[in-house]
Amino acid sequence: MVKSRERRPAGKDPGEGRGGSREEKPGISRRDCLKALTAAGSATLIGGSVDAHAYKKFSGWPDRCGVLADLTECVGCRSCEAACNRANGLPKPDVPFDEKSVFEEKRRPTASAYTVVNRYEDPEKPGTPVYRKVQCNHCNEPGCASACPVRAYTKTPEGAVLYNKDLCFGCRYCMVACPFYAPAYDYESALEPRVVKCTMCHGRVKAGGVPACVEACPVEAIKFGKRKELIKIAETRIRNRPDRYVDHIYGEHEVGGTSWLYLSRAPFERVDFPTNLPEKPLVEQTKGFLSSVPLVLVLWPAFLGMAYAATRNKEDDK
Amino acid sequence: MREESMAKADTFPARFMDKLLMGMPLSDYVRTLITPFNVVAMGILCVGIPLIVLRFVDGLATITHASNEYPWSILLGWGLFSGVPLSATGYIMATAVYVFGFKKYHPLVRLGVLTGFLGYLFAVIYLLIDIGRPWRIYYPMAVSYGPTSVLFLVAWHVALYLTVQLLEFSPAILEWLHSRRVRKWAVMITIAMTVAGVILSTLHQSALGALFLLAPGKVHPLWYSGFLPVFFFVSSIYAGLVMVIAVSTILSRFMRNSADREFLGSLDTLTVGLGKGACIVMFVYFALKLIGVAHDDNWDLLATPYGYWFLVEIFLFVLVPGFVLTRGVKRDSARMVRIGAFYALAGVILNRLNVSLITFNWAIPGHLHDLIPPVKEVFVVLAIATLHIIIFRWIVNRMPVLREHPDYREHG
């Protein structure tokens, strides 16, 4: 039993090669071939090529990118909003991008704006407001992707989480699941509504560029790079200026980590970051339930069959 | 009279029309339709149906309250999250009678299955109005699979269970159509369909709770619990039981003519029996809810406004109706059991609304201002509920649901 299993997978390749080897490579004898085969088979059996400890452990795409947003640098000029609007061909806004009155209320990304900047007063430093840019945070293990029943979301190796409108049927469970209130929905559209969110300018990044908002920022408050390196930069900044920053990189661990990372001088909850989130990716919350599904599928018929047999048995006794 | 109808009914279309009009000439039938209930129903439909059309012309924004923060509005909070537990009647009654051998509840099985079937059908109808592109509803089944999603499971299970319930109810349809041979086949699969029904129901009733597990930051911690799937499943059991009491109460009052003597004669006894089952499950559920608070050590949250609301839910809407039912059972009073049943139903609906709407986004400033649904959405819900009642009544009037068909008696 074991023997046949050990040979079958390896037997495929030489088997295919054998037909060709007779004419082109007479050097490889049948004996050599079998020897190689057995070696490959035993290697599989012993587990030489597979590390059982690392098996199925995937800690994310190694070179994924991200953006480090330093709230202490942002001046609230809204250039990023304007650049995003241009780069993504979004509809012209009702109020122009140089209008500061929008800060009077707290805004969120909508079907016509992938990103918005909000202003917060800092009670400790009156007159010097804190600005916070809001957009999709491109989670390492996105809740939206775990929620989607049709797999319309993809986490790309570059870091962006992308949405495919051709698969979406508009259940909006992704919006329920997103802890950052990032995805917006086109409620105005009768027949072709879709979910709308930041793409971290995936096309530009793939072509070697940086997201439009990052490029537009005049004070380098947002910095694009490899996520790993951005974390190091953020750590250095906190270490060098402990008076300037809260000792926390928001997004490093929240819901399993996000591509966007934030530094702030005001406590994060005061600038409306959700601070009640688990450190585990959201998919872990439903994993237990989903893994119980096959158990119920298999065990219930057995239990119910038993109950049925018991009642039948009682009837027979009568 | 009888000969006349025999002479009339020799072609299939004529026979079929005869069935649709319940043996009356068209003019007589139309006359029976003019009742106070129907006039009100027409009024509601005249407002509600154009609004549903409006959703497909001007978009969801025109009729619902749903927004980027609150993606699911009352349309789903009521139609799906409350509608599905109230439709647990089908699997509860079928399991009780066919698997666990509570044979005396046989007169209520078809009613349970029909209530369940239509409940799911209408849950899907609410869903079809709510989702963005309803014509893609089959995508999770055929186009692209998202097995990490709890909603993927719900979609599959609701679709399968709808089919299962149609098959479970099919003997009634086939008796109505006098299709003896096909009916025999349909009856043969009863036990298999019952077992399939329990499995599917266990999983998707609990899955509706599990959906919210993905939103730990949004649902209030007193309602957010790792036990959400268990809460939803266990409460669906008593929801199914009390729903059967509620529906049979209404029908025995308003549709007496469609019921046979066995149904009406045994109803009080059976009601008390169902009440007994329901109150036991309710006490179990109450205990589970307390375990939920203990498990997450949320005792301190009980002394907050949301905590008071939580206590209202589990004491006033679970424990108290449980006591009403218990008292009804002890005194053998079907009337009191019925009151308790309606009360308990309100509790189930309150719980589902609490999880899906009332405590969802509790941390957002101004959260409670967004709760009252707009009038248009209320009318859409009313219109669908009215259609639900009309179709229910249409079937009960024609098919052997509250009575056994004289040609197909099972016992005796």
Image (cartoon, rainbow, N blue to C red):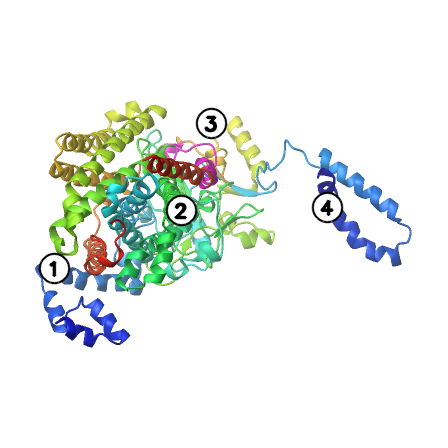
Q: What element does badge 3 sit on?
A: loop
* Amino acid, disc 4: Arg
Q: Position of residue A305 (x, y in %)?
A: 41, 39
Pointers 1 and 3 within a single chain: no
Majority secondary structure in the magenta region: helix
Residues at circles 4 and 3 in contact by the CB criterion of under 8 Å: no
Q: Position of residue A238 (x, y in %)?
A: 51, 29
Image: magenta residue range: A268-297
Residue that badge 3 annotates:
A247
Taking depth in this image into account, of B317 and B175 the one nearest to the observer is: B175
Q: Earlier in the sequence, mark 2 or mark 1?
A: 1
Q: Quadrant of residue B127?
A: bottom left
Residues at circles 1 and 3 in contact by the CB criterion of under 8 Å: no
Looking at the rendered structure, which numbered label has been put on residue B40?
1
Q: Which of the chains bears the disc numbered 4? A: A
Pointers 4 and 3 within a single chain: yes
Q: CA distance from mark 4 to mark 2?
A: 38 Å
